[in-house]
Amino acid sequence: MYNHEELPTADTFARLATELHDSEGVEETVDTVVQFAVRALACCQAGIVLAVRGRRPEIGAVTDPLIERIHAVQIAADDGPMIAALQREELIRIADVRTDGRWPHWAALVCASGIRTVLHLPLMVGNRASGVLSLYCETPDALTGDDEAVAHILARHASVAVASAQHEASLAQAVDARKLIGQAMGILMERYGLSDDRAFEVLKRYSQDSNTKLRDVAQQLIDTRKLPVNGQLR
């Protein structure tokens, strides 16, 4: 267990890097980060929110249901310091929630929860924020300059680890989708005597006509042995 008087060493971060490398998937990766944050810094709680292209951010990991609620309120309202950190791609520091004044509705909820100091750090991957690491403390001005420096290092480790986990998840989904489409094409080729090119065109047309992802059309065909739209080949 670490505290603000025993800041993490290079060996500590080396162990964190190993833990992150050994984590399986995005969920385990972000959970490793928030658990490390409360061990290594003078904060009582931590959380990570992940950016999702074209959709609202998603809560990746929290150390307490209280933090999930604080994040969920900001996501629903599309407002608050965590949202600002994500959208502006910059650090948001709140030394004392009671006197900050920038997000009054958010502050009322957080003060009632006993939180006084908040730090939001964007997880930068290239030139965009892939998420936000949030640190919470129960006393004002709780995070020192050294704590903040360590938080920046942790955010950099988290950025790389989350990006890697998301990339691996995307590759796995792509491989799974190719397998499903290949199986569905095989069914069409066997049942209707189609070539592989023709079978793929049939799947693609049904995907477009029904505004359904190609992998989902393939999955439906595999599950039901029928095509959409009355199950007739057109």
Image (tube, rainbow, N blue to C red):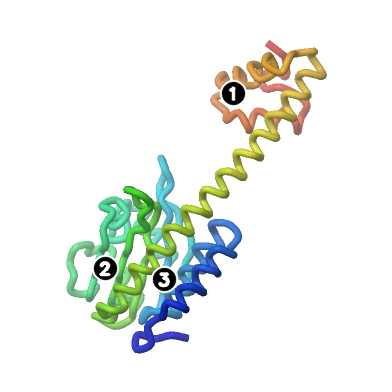
Q: Residue furthest right?
A: 190
Report the residue at 32% width, 76% height from top.
115
Measure the C-alpha gap from mark 2 to mark 3: 17 Å
Left or right of residue 149: residue 163: right
Assign a secondary structure to mark 1: helix
Nearer-the-camera pick, 225 or 182: 182
Residue 117 in which image quadrant = bottom left
Q: Position of residue 100 (x, y in %)?
A: 18, 70
Q: Which residue is mark 1?
A: 207
Which quadrant of the rendered structure holds the C terminus?
top right
Q: Is residue 79 found left or right of 60 in the rendered image? A: left
Q: Position of residue 116 (x, y in %)?
A: 28, 77
Tag 3 or tag 2, which sits nearer the N-term?
3
Packing grade of label 3 (10 A; few <14, some 14-19, many >=20) is: many
Q: Is residue 41 above or below residue 177?
A: below
Which of the labelled discs sits on residue 102, or is there none?
none
Mark 3 or 1, nearer chain start: 3
Q: CA distance from mark 2 to mark 1?
A: 46 Å
Q: Can you identify the residue that label 2 sits on?
A: 107
| Mark 3 lies on residue | 46
At a point 58% along the width and 57% down the height, the residue shown is 25
